[in-house]
Image (spheres, rainbow, N blue to C red):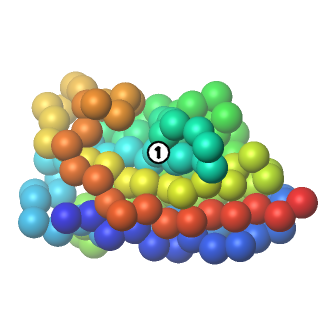
């Protein structure tokens, strides 16, 4: 089970940190990702982190502004978002799946577990 939180309303240029707490699985064996869905659009990949924190992937739209991290002791994955833009407005979903060490999923079908989503709204 995944529980996302931390969304809200922020002005352009501002920051937010999303959190996603996982339960019911061995967290250290999970790869985790963040996806988002803007109004009228499909869900898109934002970022992912593998079982090793050194394995991270970012969509071009997130590079240089967003940072994904994980805390295995707290069973939580974070998404730090800086320099937010109005086009970042979306519902953000965390996702997880058990993986081997060398594989970090970056596509929606690769993930088995999904959180409920948290709304991020960036005003101009």
Look at the picture and state if 1 lies above or below 61: below
41 or 61: nearer the viewer: 41
Q: Position of residue 18 (x, y in %)?
A: 51, 65
68 horizontally vs 94: left or right: right
Left/right of residue 55 with respect to residue 28 in the rendered view: right
Answer with left or right where residue 48 lies relative to residue 80.
left
Q: Residue at x 79, y 51 (%)?
A: 85
Q: Going 75% across and 46% down the picture, which residue do you hit?
A: 87
Location of residue 42 in the rendering, given as x and y in whole percent from the top left corner: 52, 37
Does the rendering let one see residue 36? yes
Query: What kind of element bears circle 1?
Result: strand
Considering every residue shown, the one lying at the far front of the view is: 40
Q: How many marks?
A: 1
**Label 1: few (<14), some (14–19) or many (≥20) C-alpha neighbours in 10 Å:** many
Q: Residue at x 45, y 73 (%)?
A: 5
Q: Is residue 54 visible?
A: no
> Which of the image's four quarters has the N terminus?
bottom left
Is residue 41 shown above or below 83? above
Which residue corresponds to mark 1? 35
Rendered residue at 10%/59% (across/down): 25
Q: Residue 124, how many percent across, how many down? A: 89, 60
Indicate the quadrant where residue 91 lies.
bottom right
């Amino acid at each position: 089970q995944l529980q996302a939180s931390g969304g809200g309303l922020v002005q352009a240029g501002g920051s937010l940190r999303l959190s996603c707490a996982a339960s019911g699985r061995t967290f250290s064996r999970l790869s985790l990702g963040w996806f988002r869905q803007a109004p009228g659009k499909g869900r898109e990949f934002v970022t992912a982190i593998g079982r090793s924190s050194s394995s991270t992937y970012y969509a071009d739209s997130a590079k240089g502004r967003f940072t994904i991290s994980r805390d295995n002791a707290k069973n939580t994955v974070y998404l730090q978002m800086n320099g937010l833009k109005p086009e970042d407005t979306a519902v953000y979903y965390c996702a997880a799946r058990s993986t081997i060490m060398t594989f970090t999923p970056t596509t929606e079908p690769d993930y088995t577990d999904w959180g409920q989503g948290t709304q991020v709204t960036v005003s101009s």
